[in-house]
Image (cartoon, rainbow, N blue to C red):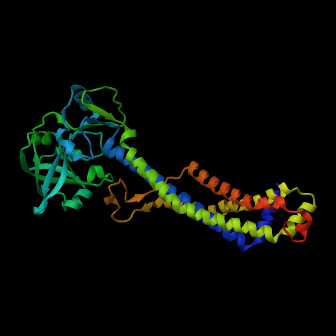
Amino acid sequence: MTSIKLALRNLIGAGLRTWLSVFILALILILIIWQYAIIDGWDRMAMRDMIAWEIGGGQIWTENYDPFDPFTLEESHRVLPQSFTDEIEKGNMASILVTQASIYPEGRIMSILLKGIDPSQQVSKLPTEELMEEYDEIPVIIGTGMARDAKLNTGDYFTVRWRDVDGTFDARELVVVDVFRCDVPAVDNGQIWISLENLQEMTQMPGEATLIVLDQGYTWTGEENGWILRDHDYLLQDMRDIIRMKKIGGSVFYVILMLLAMLAIFDTQVLSIFRRQKEIGTYMAMGMTRGQVVRLFTVEGAMHSVLAVILGAIPGIPFLYYMAKVGYAMPAGSDSMGLPIAEKIYPAYSFGLILSVMLLVIITTTIVSFLPSRKISKMNPTEAIKGKLL
């Protein structure tokens, strides 16, 4: 306790030199917490949106289906088994049929994925109920990203061309009945959603589907030949890998800032020991052991981080609270990156995040403060009083 009081008095007595180091550490502390909270907030929002819009409680794929390989789509459809049909009627599943197609909005050509889904499904947040209305042409719904790329709006008509199960090309007129806002590119970009019954009729695949989406509250424990269960661990792995790489990439910048701050504290400790040789000799002459003096200077250096936590809380708490309320607006064009990114990301603060960052700064500062303090153990009290190091 005496070491802490003495160290605090010495720090305050050092004046501007102390407060500059404390200010830099406080700034780094706030920035690290904010940056990691932004990434954690993005992680939570992305996972929540992907589950709500795309993957539900998991998916069941036909054995040949690969969403990243469009050449597998021709063989990626099977007749729905009776067990799936029963669960679909109960609302526990929703079947989706996927096929490649081309659209011709205003004379332009654009390759897309035509996806058929049951309009009465409740598994996904897709506004499929719009597909139940009667129109002169086949109704479809699209996302805002698809509407922007194809320059389509609600009420627009366009031509679609596809190949049926026999490889024969056909074409029809479609009408856009709804444009929905979605932050999941796998549901929006290059996708056109149509009634499953209409798509089955168009492709001559009655009763067939490419994949099944499970309801979030339903767990499938059965087994069907030719169908493979994909759980959340499998479907969300790519997104988790991206989040992890973003954290590692963002850490590089803050490691550099931390190294610069630690270098400043290291130099401050070395200079302090050099200038305070007589003081150190006096401590030893008064009966303090070398270990106690080393501990005093180590505590004195570590107090920079403690003061930084206290000082950083004054502007940090209002700033972090404000960002949690208003969110961080993503730059224009970020939705075209192919990742589920909302217009605003709200930071997700956790006790573990704040505590871990604080401990990281305190422990690192303590270690850096101890390294130059070891030189005190080699000092002779008599020579130290004279201002001479051995």
Side of 206 relative to 346 (left or right): left
Q: Image quadrant of residue 109?
A: bottom left
Residue sitting nearer the eye, 67 or 35: 67
Left or right relative to 235: residue 317: right
105, above or below 57, in the image: below
> Is 192 left, or right, of 29 in this rendering?
left
* Any part of residue 305 in sight: yes
> Which residue shows up at 77% across the image and 69% down it?
272
**Could you say where residue 48 lies in the image, as x and y percent from the top left?**
39, 46
Q: Quadrant of residue 343?
A: bottom left
Q: Indicate the position of residue 234 as horizontal and vertical percent values.
A: 37, 40
Q: How many marks?
A: 0
At x 22% / y 29%, what residue is drawn? 85
* Image quadrant in which the N terminus is located: bottom right
Q: Which image quarter is the C terminus in? A: bottom right
Where residue 128 appears, as percent x and y from the top left, is: 23, 45
